[in-house]
Amino acid sequence: MSGDAVPIGRRVAYLRVRRKLSQQSFADRLGKSKSWVDKVERGIRPLERVSTIREVAAVLRVDTAMLLGRDAQPAEVAARDTGVARIRAALSTYEMVLGRAAGREVMSTDRLARALGHAWAAYQQARYPRLVELLPGLLTEVHRAHVRDPEAYRVAVVQAYRVTAALLVKLDERSLAWLAADRAMSAATGDRVLLAGAAVQLGQVLRTVARARSVMLAAAYQIAPVDPNRGTPQEWSLCGSLLVQAALIAARTGDDRAADDLLDEATEMAAQVGDGHDHHRTGFGPAAVEAGRVTAAVELGDGPQAVARHEEVIGWDGWRWLPVEHRAAHLVDAARGYLLTGDPVGAARALIRADRVAPAEVRHRPVVRKVVDQLARDPRAPTTITPLAVSLGLL
């Protein structure tokens, strides 16, 4: 007896009988009335609260996946793991040694640039399953082209490794993300613009490494305009993005003063750029910096500050111009902020909104699953979080 077609009440009844429990003895173990059990089994009373579902499963001595008629591991998790393995294989292939590019046609620089643009669009729209499918083949094409003409395809190599690192950070594949970011940095050596772009992804990978802050700052000041009055939006975007990364590293390592100072400096640069732009795939602008302040506050454990800034920034016009990925990630950070303030209702609201904005941000990021699981275990959490927890296989 299994499957989503079977109502949960009937599954409870079946599993109760299999355990040789009467309705009364089952009710006693749950601390409920026999009438409550009868109504659940007949489908009159729904099981909505996560805590209650877990208690029922514990008494029946089954895991919640069996009680709910679901696989223990959601299909998308298995697909993601398979896709990551293919990306790992693509990163582990060294065309220059194997000589596979010899005599084979490679993509033109224009065609490869379009393919990379499509990959970046998939990332910024939080279509992570699609990007997982695209990257192995794209990396292979980039490797082949680079062997044929290293200088002509240098930009493509950096961009391919950047978007790969960005995705792998989302999927919490830190070691593999570091490999991709490190390769981007190596390929960018000697070009301050390419190096600054690659360093943005390196900062995402090395968020927990205190010494990485100095790397971010060095890259930022290399790309900073010599004359502030003549700086371009592209320069300010790269420099400001690197300062935000440095600030988040400072926040993660507990240096609140440095985080504030760096974010203040980034705010001044964002004013030179404005919202609604995406120079060098950064999405940098005033709203992005303010979202960074929310993340920094969460990392520092300052829930009230995170919530206050979140509730302010989502009212800005610039908030709606941020990439979908950025907005959804911000909502997850906001949920963490609400949890820090002891507000499970606000946290659930933010997570459900994130799921509407970009389902893959919630369903494919292991770190988000941990937040949902933490919230689902809170007996004060609203029942609105239960369907999301169920869909993630957390019950």
Image (cartoon, rainbow, N blue to C red):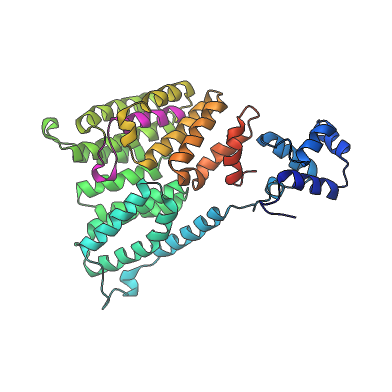
> Of residues 35 and 19, which is closer to you in this image?
35
The residue depicted at 70 percent of the width and 39 percent of the height is 53
Question: Which residue is rendered at x = 82% and y = 32% of the image?
Answer: 35
The reply to whether residue 77 is visible in this rendering is yes
Q: Residue at x 59, y 38 (%)?
A: 373
Q: Could you say where residue 380 lies in the image, as x and y percent from the top left?
A: 63, 27
In this image, 92 relative to 365: left or right? left
Magenta span: 276-298
Q: How many numbered dots are placed on residues in this image?
A: 0
User: Taking 76 as reference, is 142 left or right?
Assistant: left
Residue 210 shows up from this direction: no
138 shown above or below 245? below
Q: In which quarter of the image is the N terminus?
A: bottom right
Query: Does residue 151 lie above or below 219 as drawn?
Result: below
Q: Is residue 203 magenta?
A: no
Residue 38 screen position, x and y as percent = 81, 37
| Majority secondary structure in the magenta region | helix
Instruction: Please tell me which residue lies in front, 253 or 38.
Output: 38
Query: Residue 261 is drawn in which quadrant?
Result: top left
Residue 289 counted in the magenta span: yes
Location of the C terminus by quadrant is top right
